[in-house]
């Protein structure tokens, strides 16, 4: 009996040892920051479904992870879920009980852009973002230690402050809001842009915004001088240079150039946009509109058709490209589409046909055309 019991105990020990040795350790969860970095990469790659899964993993482990919630809000914007995005960003700022101690300025900036129906809310969010960012700059200047894992790119922060201040100016100047009729609107815009240029002296976007204000004040010569200063600061930069203004800023610049009948710089800016993104329907529209205006001026001046027909054909080619992209992208700007169609109809009435398929690029050397005002060495005279 004793031997049997001893043998049984030995077998039990062997079985127990066997179980321990063959059981694999539980898989260790990856760090949250690694998951967040991967989610950011997936968002850039427009793999929205997989990005959402990574963010879900983070938020299941840390429901109030501020950076993950901020990225979730951006994902929701990209996928068209505007109401959810708004709620997500609102959860990151007071009075939300789960807002982090330091509200991320990006949440305020996104909420400002989402406050289409409430200009006062938009201004409040822009102001909050600027105050947060300016405080970060002051802290860095004083040598205040940053939070773990936080880095501050001073130039990028200054650019963000400038864009937020410009955003406020655009709200004040928007004719769809009553704010533009406020007696203090003009002085407020001047003060905001002075603040922007104090943060980043010579900033191209701030100078361009100030030029828009000068246009609204019927001061075209002052606007031209500001545009020259702005444009010359970046016009010769490489296409990949991070100092280039955003595409939308360049779109706005080309519109002001066209308003001032400065066709050569307008076309140069537009061609730079199309070189960066040849699927931009608005850029093709502006290219067509610029060539149309050049041809129209020559036509109204009584010049022979041979002298303006090439410009008119360039206009039609670009406008046809705009309309094709407008349909393919289900573009929301319906007035743009209607104006492009109207211009095509006018060109058709003048007997101007589109270039044969495959030849659209052959006549694209507009840089050599004698349009706009240029000095002898080909540089544009803005003043």
Image: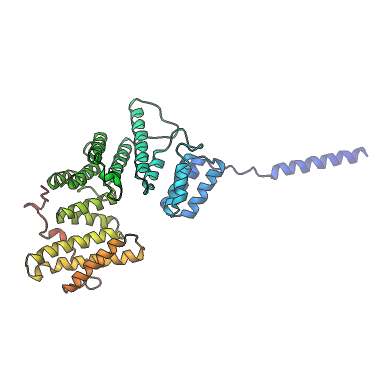
In the rendered view, would you say 145 is above or below 197? Answer: above
Q: Percent position (x, y) of residue 114?
A: 39, 48
The color scheme shown is rainbow
Q: Residue at x 81, y 41 (%)?
A: 12
Q: Percent position (x, y) of residue 83?
A: 45, 50
Q: Percent position (x, y) of residue 104?
A: 42, 38
Is 247 situated left or right of 211 in this image?
right
Image quadrant assignment for residue 162: top left
Q: Percent position (x, y) of residue 51?
A: 48, 51
Image quadrant assignment for residue 149: top left
Q: Residue at x 14, y 62 (%)?
A: 294
Q: Nearer the viewer, residue 28 or 19?
A: 28
Q: Nearer the viewer, residue 202 or 337?
A: 337
Q: Residue at x 13, y 64 (%)?
A: 296
Is 195 situated left or right of 19 in this image?
left
Q: Nearer the viewer, residue 168 or 141?
A: 168
Q: Nearer the viewer, residue 125 or 77?
A: 125
Image quadrant for the N terminus?
A: top right
Q: Residue furthest right?
A: 1
Residue 337 appears in the picture as rendered: yes
Residue 37 appears in the picture as rendered: no
């Amino acid at each position: 009996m004793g031997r049997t019991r001893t043998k049984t105990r030995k077998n039990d020990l062997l079985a127990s040892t066997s179980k321990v040795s063959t059981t694999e350790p539980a898989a260790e969860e990856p760090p949250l920051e690694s998951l967040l970095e991967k989610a950011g990469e997936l968002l850039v790659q427009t793999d929205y479904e997989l990005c959402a899964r990574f963010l879900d993993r983070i938020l299941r482990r840390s429901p109030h992870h501020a950076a993950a919630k901020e990225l979730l809000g951006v994902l929701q914007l990209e996928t068209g879920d505007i109401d959810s995005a708004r709620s997500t960003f609102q959860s990151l700022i007071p009075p939300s009980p789960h807002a982090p101690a330091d509200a991320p300025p990006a949440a305020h900036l996104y909420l400002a852009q989402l406050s289409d129906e409430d200009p006062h809310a938009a201004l409040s969010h822009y102001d909050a973002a600027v105050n947060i960012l300016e405080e970060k700059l002051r802290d860095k200047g004083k040598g205040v230690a940053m939070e773990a894992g936080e880095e501050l790119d001073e130039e990028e922060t200054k650019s963000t402050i400038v864009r937020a201040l410009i955003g406020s100016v655009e709200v004040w100047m928007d004719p769809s809001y009553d704010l533009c009729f406020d007696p203090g609107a003009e002085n407020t815009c001047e003060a905001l842009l002075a603040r922007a240029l104090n943060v980043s002296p010579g900033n191209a976007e701030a100078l361009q915004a100030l030029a828009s204000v000068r246009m609204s004040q019927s001061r075209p010569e002052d606007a031209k001088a500001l545009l020259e200063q702005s444009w010359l600061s970046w016009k010769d930069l490489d296409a990949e240079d991070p100092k280039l203004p955003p595409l939308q800023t360049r779109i706005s610049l080309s519109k002001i150039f066209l308003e001032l009948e400065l066709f050569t710089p307008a076309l140069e800016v537009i061609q730079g946009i199309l070189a960066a993104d040849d699927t931009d329907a608005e850029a093709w529209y502006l290219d067509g509109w610029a060539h149309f205006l050049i041809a129209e001026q020559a036509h109204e001046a009584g010049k022979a058709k041979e002298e303006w027909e090439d410009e008119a054909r360039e206009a039609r080619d670009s406008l046809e490209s705009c309309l094709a992209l407008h349909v393919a992208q289900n573009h929301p700007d319906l007035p743009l589409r209607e104006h492009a169609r109207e211009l095509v109809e006018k060109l058709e009435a003048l007997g101007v046909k589109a270039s044969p398929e495959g030849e659209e690029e052959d006549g694209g050397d507009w840089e050599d055309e004698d349009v706009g005002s240029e000095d002898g060495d080909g540089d544009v005279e803005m003043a």
